[in-house]
Amino acid sequence: MMIDFSMPGPLLVALVLGFFLPIPLWFMTRLSSLRERNPVQFLYAVILTFGVWFLTVAFVPMFAAGGLEDWLVGGMALAGGALVYLEIWGLMSRGYTLSVIAALHEARRPLTPDEIARNYRGGDGLGWIMRHRLGGLEAAGMVTLDDDRVTLQAPGGFFVARLYRLCIQVLGLRSTG
C-alpha cells in the first residue's frame, strides 16, 4: 500500500503565494497614491495575490484544479495565509507597545513615560491615536465630529455599539480599550 503525498495544484500555488504575500504588500507601500493608506495597501496586495492565484490555477495546466474541492481548498489556504499576515501586519502597524520599544531603542537612553508619549508616531504624540480612531469612525458614518463633541450616529453607530456590548457579554470578556 502506497500513501499519496501529492498536493493539488491550487493548494500548492496558494501555499507558495501565501508565503510570498509580503512582496506585493511591499510594492503597494511604495505607491505614492497609497501612501499613508495602510489598510488599502494590504487589501490591494491580497486582491493581487488572489488574482495571480486564480489566473495560475485557471490557465497553467500543471496547476489546474481537479474539481471544485481543489479550488475551495486552495482558496481557503490562501485566505488563511492572508489572515496570518493580517494579524502580523496589524500588530506592526498599530502596536503601541512595539512602538514604545522602538522609541527606546532609537533614543539610546532611558525615557520618561511623558517623553515616550510626546515622541509617539514621529512626534504626533498619543493624541494621534484618538484623532485617527475618531476619523475612522467618522468616515464609516458611526459618529459625527463637531468641534469638541463626538456624537454617535444612528443607525450604524448604535447597532455596532449594541453588537459590541452583546459580544463582550456573551463571550465573558472585559471591555476593551
Image: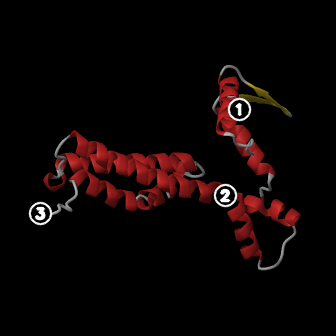
Looking at marks 1 and 2 on the same chain, the residue that comes earlier in the sequence is marked by 2
Quadrant hosting residue 3: bottom left
Q: Position of residue 62 (x, y in %)?
A: 15, 56
Tag 1–tag 2 contact (CB < 8 Å): no
Secondary element at image label 3: loop
Looking at marks 3 and 2 on the same chain, the residue that comes earlier in the sequence is marked by 3
> Mark on residue 165?
1
Name the image colouring.
Answer: secondary structure
Secondary element at image label 1: helix
Indicate whether 168 appears above or below 151.
below
Indicate whether 72 appears above or below 78.
above
Q: Which-is-in-front pick, marks 1 and 2?
A: 1
> Mark on residue 95?
2
- Tell me the amino acid under the disc marked 2: Gly
Tag 3 residue: 1
Determine whether, in the image, residue 14 is placed left or right of residue 37. left
| Distance CA(mark 3)–CA(mark 1) | 56 Å
- Tell me the amino acid under the disc marked 1: Arg
Q: State the residue in front, 99 or 24.
A: 99
Looking at the figure, which quarter contains the C terminus? top right
Indicate whether 12 appears above or below 166.
below
- Tell me the amino acid under the disc marked 3: Met
| Distance CA(mark 3)–CA(mark 2) | 51 Å
Quadrant hosting residue 88: bottom right
| Distance CA(mark 1)–CA(mark 2) | 24 Å
